[in-house]
Structures are given as structure tokens and as C-alpha cells.
Amino acid sequence: MDESPQYLYWSISIILFIVISDILDGYLARKYNSVTSFGKIIDPVSDKICLMFILIYLIEIYPLRFLLFFMLLSIRDIILITFTSYLAIYHDTVTQANTYGKMFIFVTMLMIISYIFMFNNSISNILYIMSVILLIISMFIYIKAHIETINSYENL
């Protein structure tokens, strides 16, 4: 891995740009009351695209650990996309991110930064475990919320 100052500068700049633009986008959408169904769908999709590119890079460096994480995340996202698509198509409803989903993304970004820049192995491992736990918790909370939404439409 290239550890030149220029590489570190660009790597940190790109990661910060992704995180700050995501936070700013959500803040501005809520502040100006311009939250849209399209935005609710495209925001997490763009987050995942960025995340998947980074994970593919990390799979080359830490094959078993990040291949497992990539697979768990893919399974979670396929399940959630299925529910979200069903609700959008059949009930014209798009759910928003929940707190655990946001915590998962935040901790995962910290974990990724710690592995890319090899700050501290123990901290990286703790963040990895926290990311996996939040991935699983957020998945079940999203599934529960989606099922409750579906049930509320079926009980009308």
C-alpha cells in the first residue's frame, strides 16, 4: 500500500467528503423540508456504493474478515431492498433510516478508516465487532419496522 503523504491526503479527503456530504445532504433536506421518496432511496444506495468500493479494496488486504463483512452487508441490503421495493411499489411508501442504521454507518466508517490507515489493531478489531453487531441489530429493526408498515396497510 502506498503510504506517501499525497496518498494519505487524498484518501482522507475522499472519505471526509463522502461523510460530510452525506450529513449535509440530510441536514439540508430536513431543514428546507425537501425530504423526498427519491432522496430516501438514493441516499442509502449511494452510501452503499461508496462503502462497497472501499470494502472491495479491504478484501484484498484482509481477505477473510472483509469478505465476511461484505457478505453480511450484502445479505442485509438484499433483504432491506426487497422490503423497501415492495413498500414503494405496492403502497407508495418509503421508510427512512433509523438510528441504528445511522450508528452502523458511522461506526463502520470509523472501522474502515482504522483499517485503511492501520491506526491500532485492537481498536480496529473492536470497531469491526461493533460494526457487525450494529449491522445485525439494524437489520432486524428495519425488518420489524417494514413488517409493521406492511401489516398496517393490510389492516386498513
Image: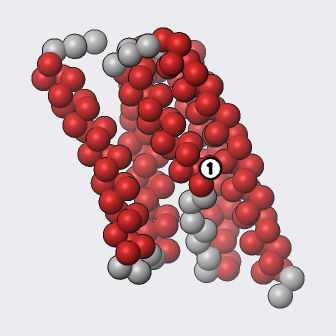
Q: Residue at x 32, y 46 (%)?
A: 18
State the residue in front, 71 or 119.
Answer: 119
Give the residue furthest to the bottom.
156
Q: Is residue 102 in view?
A: yes
Residue bearing mark 1: 100
- Crowding at dot 1, Cα within 10 Å, few <14 / some 14-19 / many 20+, comes out as some
Q: Which image quarter holds the C terminus? A: bottom right
**Coordinates of residue 87 in the picture (x, y in percent):** 66, 71
Q: Which image quarter holds the N terminus? A: top left
Q: Residue at x 55, y 18 (%)?
A: 125
Residue 134: image quadrant is: top right
- Considering the numbered disc 1 on the image, is that residue within a helix, a strand or a loop? helix
**Coordinates of residue 146 in the picture (x, y in percent):** 72, 64
Q: How many marks?
A: 1
Label 1 sits on what residue type?
Tyr
State the residue in front, 65 or 108.
Answer: 108
Q: Is residue 78 in view?
A: no
Give the residue furthest to the right.
155
Q: Residue at x 65, y 54 (%)?
A: 80
143 above or below 136?
Answer: below
18 above or below 133?
Answer: below
Residue 61: image quadrant is: top left
- Name the colour scheme: secondary structure
Residue 56: image quadrant is: top left
Q: Answer with left or right where residue 21 lies relative to residue 108.
A: left
112 above or below 46?
Answer: above
Give the residue furthest to the left.
6
**Coordinates of residue 57 in the picture (x, y in percent):** 38, 24
Q: Residue at x 71, y 43 (%)?
A: 137
66 above or below 110?
Answer: above
